[in-house]
Image: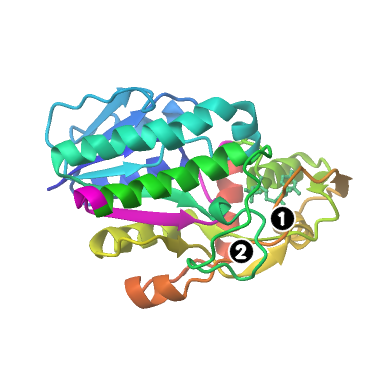
Amino acid sequence: MAKYLVTGGAGFIGSHLCETFLTRGHEVLCMDNYSTGAKQNIGSFLKNPRFRFIDHNVSRYIEVQEPLDFILHFASPASPVDYLELPIPTLKVGALGTHNTLGLAKSKDAGYLLASTSEVYGDPAVRPQSEEYWGNVNPIGPRGVYDEAKRFAEAMTMAYHRFHGLNTRIVRIFNTYGPRMRLRDGRVVPNFIMQALKGEPLTVYGQGQQTRSFLYVDDLVAGINRLLESDHHLPINIGNPHEMTVLEFAEKIIALTGSKSTIAYKPLPEDDPQVRQPDITKARKILGWEPKVELEEGLIKTIEYFRT
Ligand code: UDP
């Protein structure tokens, strides 16, 4: 039995991680300040004696008395709408929160995994994006608060690995969806599903020709577990290479919900990446991982979650 600290453990992805570690018989310390996380995401674990919740903002000094085996740093606003509303907390949790959690890992001699993002590639000039691509980020644009915080977080994690010999991992997560996403987090998956279920027009930004590729959360969790079991310290992409335009995605949601919704075109947000598609050659080779859940299958489960 190992002890895991998951920061952002009450968030969408964090809560799924807490759940798998509990299922595998481990102990979980879940740290969150409910900035964008939710109590209901962890409600079913609270009775588990191997689970403990700590209400704390990880951008401040973190004190944990007991030994820890792994720290997974997932605390951060992650939806563009959220990080535009919380620009300074986003910068702080990526910078100070990463520094604090790395320091804690060093003091506990614990393994460390950083949740990074496809946003480190910015509005990519190449496609698909492999880990070798350095990105095309506007540091002072509205998304810069998230992109640069995560780029700094990666640099800090690599520095702790190289300088202190910390046992670190970095996962670059591409658009992930599934149950426990916040209904109003403003991202395309909850927006479109909610709009379709209410029979409202789906708000497609721009002409909807920008592309994304969507990964079901169970596949992400499987990839993260493989990464934890590996000894790969450089960043690794975890995402679904199946790329589509946002307009095609809107049409898929309308079809799967059986909705009569129409499409309403809205202005494209500033610096919205025009393409995004992970190159997962490394994940396939090094981790023996690739996505298993078909888009329709994952979306049907997610629609069901939002319906109830
Ligand atoms: N998008 C959209 N309508 C919405 C929400 C998002 O057309 O109601 C688009 C957005 O402009 C972007 C894509 O969907 O091109 C994915 O947006 P999301 O907010 O999910 O996250 P991102 O991938 O940009 O980080």
Q: Is residue 11 shown above or below 175? A: above
Residue 164 falls inside the magenta stretch: yes
Residue 247: give x, y in percent of width and height: 79, 58
In the image as oriented, which residue stretches furthest toward the front? 163
Q: At label 2, which amino acid type do we have?
A: Glu
Q: Residues within 10 Å of mark 1 (few under 14, many from 20)?
A: many
**Earlier residue among tags 1 and 2:** 1
Is the C-beta of the residue carrying label 2 under 8 Å from the nearest atom of ligand 1? no
Tell me the magenta residue range. 163-182
The residue under the point 49% across, 68% down is 132
Q: Is residue 67 shown above or below 126? A: above
Left or right, residue 224 beside residue 21: right
The residue under the point 42% across, 27% down is 39
Toward which corner of the image does residue 276 lie, by quadrant? Answer: bottom right
Residue bearing mark 1: 253
Left or right, residue 1 beside residue 84: left
Residue 2: give x, y in percent of width and height: 15, 46
Residue toward you, 139 or 188? 139
Residue 130: assigned label: none
Residue bearing mark 2: 296
Residue toward you, 301 or 213? 213
Q: Is residue 212 shown above or below 104? A: below
Q: Quadrant of the C terminus?
A: top right
Residue toward you, 302 or 154? 154
Let me know if residue 36 appears in the view.
Answer: no
Residue 57: give x, y in percent of width and height: 38, 24
Colour theme: rainbow
Toward which corner of the image does residue 283 lie, by quadrant? Answer: bottom left
**Label 2's element?**
helix
Residue 165: give x, y in percent of width and height: 20, 52
Disc 1 versus disc 2: distance between alpha carbons? 9 Å
